[in-house]
Image (cartoon, rainbow, N blue to C red):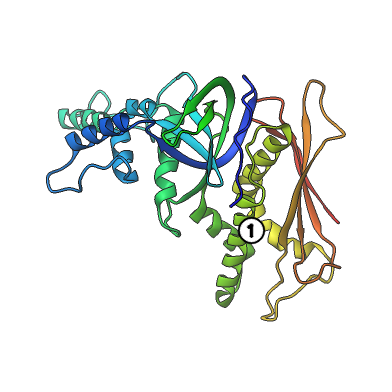
Amino acid sequence: MEHTPAPEPRDGAPVHAVGRIGVDFRSEARRDGFRRRLAAEAAPGGPPPDPGDVRQLYDHLVRSPWASSALTWTLSVGSTPVYALEAEPAVAMDWAGPLPDPGPAGSDEERLALLRRIAAAPPVHPVHRALREALLGQSLPAGDPGRIGRLTVPGRLTERTARLFSGEIVPVVQVGTLGLACWAETPLLAAAVDAVDPRPDDHGRVAGHVRALLDKVYFQFRNAGLSAAERALNHAATESFLTGGLLGEGPLSAGLVPGGPEHPTGAPGLYTLETITVARSPHCRAGSDCRDVMIRFSDPADERRAAVTYVHTVDVSDRPPVTLAPVHRFLG
């Protein structure tokens, strides 16, 4: 199995990484402390308290969001933890959604119901909320509407490190609120399949094609998000595949090539993601650091057919990075 080494700490260096969220208790004493808290909250006849049970831990963090800071949150690239995560100093706290306002004419029952809701789920730091939601979403089965595949994490390296329970030492990253993005797999894949608009009997083929494309982004192009090129790639991938619709538009690139391929069923042939490359942009604003991220799709059945390349120009001088101008595409 490929090993992704932890990056050398450089205090203050920007980070823009994509990976899976985990928790580490650092010691048996810390784990036992969480087990005692779970036992105090457990309902009679329920399962035994287990801090390793994601659902139990998530429910505890909803009721007691301040406990999030007692955990060591980790970000893994592949199967290797590369960072310990801590939230930036809180500017404000929030709930997952707006709270109802009983108004001046609200009844005592409405006000009491509002207070009970606040007590059951107190406000939380937006970073801690994103981390706990990602942790729960990763544990859900494939096809579940709430399943989360990855989390995009913007932040800065600190001069500190954290020793995990396994003995590994990883750098600590202070995570910012701006740029946090969950890769919600099920709606993402459904939207991509709908964009391709397959025939009813062709749905499985297209869904498998899109799933393979997403897995290629996850595994072939994974990185620690530390260098300028890596930050640009992760930002472009997050924007392109989550918000830009490239997960659905990319396979339809065949339609941009005259005489494009056709599947034996009569449905249009689909292009596949060939590679993603990053180069310094020849045009950039003063005081900025720009990279061109080129996402190339090609015909897997005929290498002689023209490929289609999508170019994202990303300015990585700030945190989080920002995409400049519209996305360009060309043949070849």
Other residues around mark 1 within 10 Å, as few (<14) / some (14–19) / many (≥20): some
Up/down of 175 relative to 330, above or below:
above
Q: Residue at x 58, y 62 (%)?
A: 193
Closest to the observer: 273 or 83?
83
Q: Is 73 positioned to the left or the right of 329 in the image? A: left
The residue sitting at the left extreme is 44
Q: Quadrant of residue 134?
A: top left
Q: Quadrant of residue 165?
A: top left
Q: Is 313 positioned to the left or the right of 133 in the image? A: right
Looking at the rendered structure, the secondary structure element under dot 1 is helix
Q: Residue at x 79, y 53 (%)?
A: 309
Q: Residue 47: x percent and y percent? A: 20, 48
Residue 100 in view here? no
Q: Amino acid at mark 1?
A: Leu
Q: Please give the residue where the numbered disc 1 appears in the rendered image.
A: 213
Up/down of 208 relative to 109, above or below:
below
Q: Residue at x 16, y 28 (%)?
A: 108
Q: How many marks?
A: 1
